[in-house]
């Protein structure tokens, strides 16, 4: 299992959906733009962006409500590969991030944090 921890930029609004048994999951698409400052040229040099998809289960509704396209966020999780059989008989695969935590980067933006209250089970 490979761990993943990066500051990234969201390339689309998070897409919230529910499984048939009612569990929320949010699909998150983001870009990693790495680069460096070239002192001789006096400017930033960007490398080609890498685009990845992520799935976030615990806290999915919070992420969908709080994040949107263009936000710079910090993503932690595990790299996973999903494989499937295509109609033509070949095997397809896709690498994605199984996100364990996500939140706004405060380097170039601000955020207002609101604690979510969890409902307590009814006492018997």
Image (tube, rainbow, N blue to C red):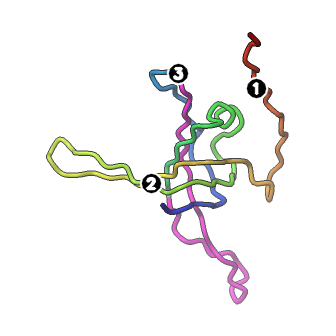
Residue 123 drawn at (x, y percent):
76, 13
The stretch drawn in magenta includes residue 6: no
The residues tagged by marks 1 and 2 sit, at their Cα atoms, a distance apart of 30 Å
The stretch drawn in magenta includes residue 39: yes
Residue that numbered label 3 is attached to: 22
Residue 117 drawn at (x, y percent):
80, 27
The residues tagged by marks 3 and 2 sit, at their Cα atoms, a distance apart of 23 Å
Say which residue appears at 62% left-offset and 73% top-offset: 35
Say which residue appears at 83% left-offset and 39% top-offset: 113
Residue that numbered label 1 is attached to: 118
SS class, disc 1: loop
Give the mark, 1 or 2, whose residue is nearer the N terminus.
Answer: 2
Give the mark, 3 or 1, whose residue is nearer the N terminus.
Answer: 3
Mark 2, other Cα within 10 Å: few <14 / some 14–19 / many ≥20: some
Most distant residue in the front direction: 124
Residue that numbered label 2 is attached to: 80
SS class, disc 2: strand
């Amino acid at each position: 299992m490979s761990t993943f921890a990066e500051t990234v930029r969201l390339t689309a609004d998070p897409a919230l959906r529910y499984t048939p048994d009612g569990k929320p999951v949010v699909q998150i698409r983001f870009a990693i733009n790495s680069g460096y400052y070239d002192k001789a040229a006096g400017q930033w040099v960007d490398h080609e962006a890498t685009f990845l998809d992520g799935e976030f289960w615990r806290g999915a509704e919070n992420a969908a409500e709080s994040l949107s396209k263009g936000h710079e966020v910090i993503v932690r999780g595990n790299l996973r590969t999903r494989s499937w059989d295509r109609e033509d008989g070949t095997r397809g695969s896709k690498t994605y991030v199984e996100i364990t935590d996500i939140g706004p980067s405060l380097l170039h933006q601000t955020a207002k944090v609101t604690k979510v209250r969890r409902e307590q089970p009814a006492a018997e």
